[in-house]
């Protein structure tokens, strides 16, 4: 059984921690997070670049292999019964994740997976309770990379367990959301709009306009609770 490749905290422990889900349809839900390393995209505003940017961060310092048994022990040693698998892009490691998710489900846990929507969920589609799909818009700065993969997004759109969370900066991003929603026939009730921001001030400035858009179009609105509560910190 292959190890997972996960983010490493400054104290050497894997980045597995209890908090509340800060974004999306489960915002506010007590959750245990496990952060996987590696990503296939390069968003300019990414707040977890330490999981993939080896020009700015030391890979050996920031990441580590972790056996499934050790991951399970760390997760089940924390109180929340909702587990959020985040990254990086977790589905790059979907094969390694399958036995972990199977064990969690057998133990009565609820499992969410955060994904950028460019990698098929494979066998995980039948195991995961909720996919938080966040296709990246043009302002993410992923020039030359495949940030929109139509076959994969069609696959997620067909899953009732998948919601679509879009990080929006302004009107141009909103126009992209509308095109994608129509292209993949995503019901408005499964669309979540969230302002881009890594500080409380940025989120506060961009929220009123976006909340009004959601009110008018039937979308969900999400802020970033963890940023508002703790700021831009790891392990919360």
Image (tube, rainbow, N blue to C red):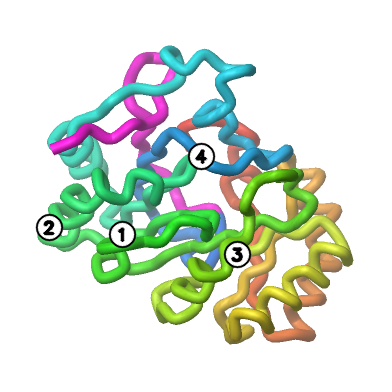
Q: Which residues are magenta?
A: 1-22
Q: Position of residue 45 (x, y in %)?
A: 72, 39
Asked if the residue under mark 4 is in contact with the one under mark 3, i.e. CB atoms within 8 Å, the reply is: no
Q: Position of residue 64 (x, y in %)?
A: 34, 22
Residue in the foreground of this view, choosing between 65 and 13: 65
Residue underneath mark 4 = 39
Left or right: where does residue 139 sit relative to residue 224? right
Instruction: Say which quarter of the image contains residue 16.
Output: top left
Q: Position of residue 188 (x, y in %)?
A: 63, 84
Q: Quadrant of the N terminus?
A: top left
The crowd level at tag 4 (other Cα within 10 Å; few <14, some 14-19, many 20+) is many
Residue underneath mark 2 = 107
Give the label on residue 111, or none.
1
Left or right: where does residue 214 sit relative to residue 100? right
The crowd level at tag 1 (other Cα within 10 Å; few <14, some 14-19, many 20+) is many
8 inside magenta stretch: yes
Among numbered discs 3 and 1, the one appearing first in the sequence: 1
* Secondary structure state at the residue bearing disc 3: strand
* Secondary structure state at the residue bearing disc 4: loop
Q: At x 77% / y 55%, what residue is drawn? A: 138
Residue underneath mark 3 = 165
Among numbered discs 3 and 2, the one appearing first in the sequence: 2
Among numbered discs 3 and 4, the one appearing first in the sequence: 4
Nearer to us: label 3 or label 4: 4
Asked if the residue under mark 1 is in contact with the one under mark 2, i.e. CB atoms within 8 Å, the reply is: no
The crowd level at tag 2 (other Cα within 10 Å; few <14, some 14-19, many 20+) is few
């Amino acid at each position: 059984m292959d190890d997972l490749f996960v983010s490493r905290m400054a104290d050497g422990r894997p980045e597995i921690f209890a908090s509340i889900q800060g974004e999306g349809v489960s915002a506010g839900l007590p959750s245990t997070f496990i952060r996987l390393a590696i990503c296939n995209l390069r968003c300019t505003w990414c707040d977890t670049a330490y999981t993939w940017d080896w020009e700015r961060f030391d890979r050996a310092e920031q990441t580590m292999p972790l056996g499934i048994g050790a991951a399970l022990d760390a997760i089940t040693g924390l109180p929340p019964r909702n587990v959020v698998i985040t990254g990086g892009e977790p589905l790059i490691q979907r094969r390694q994740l399958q036995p972990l998710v199977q064990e969690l489900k057998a133990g009565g846990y609820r499992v969410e997976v955060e994904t950028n929507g460019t990698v098929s969920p494979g066998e995980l589609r039948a195991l995961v309770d909720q996919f938080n799909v966040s296709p990246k818009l043009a302002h993410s700065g992923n020039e030359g990379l495949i940030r929109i993969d139509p076959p994969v997004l069609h696959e997620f759109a067909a899953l009732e367990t998948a919601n679509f969370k879009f990080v929006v900066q302004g009107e141009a991003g909103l126009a992209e959301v509308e095109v994608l929603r129509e292209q993949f026939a995503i019901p408005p009730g499964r669309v979540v709009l969230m302002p881009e921001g890594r500080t409380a001030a940025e989120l506060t400035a961009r929220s009123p306009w976006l909340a009004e858009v959601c009110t008018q179009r039937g979308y969900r609105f999400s802020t970033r609770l963890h940023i508002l509560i703790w700021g831009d910190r790891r392990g919360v």
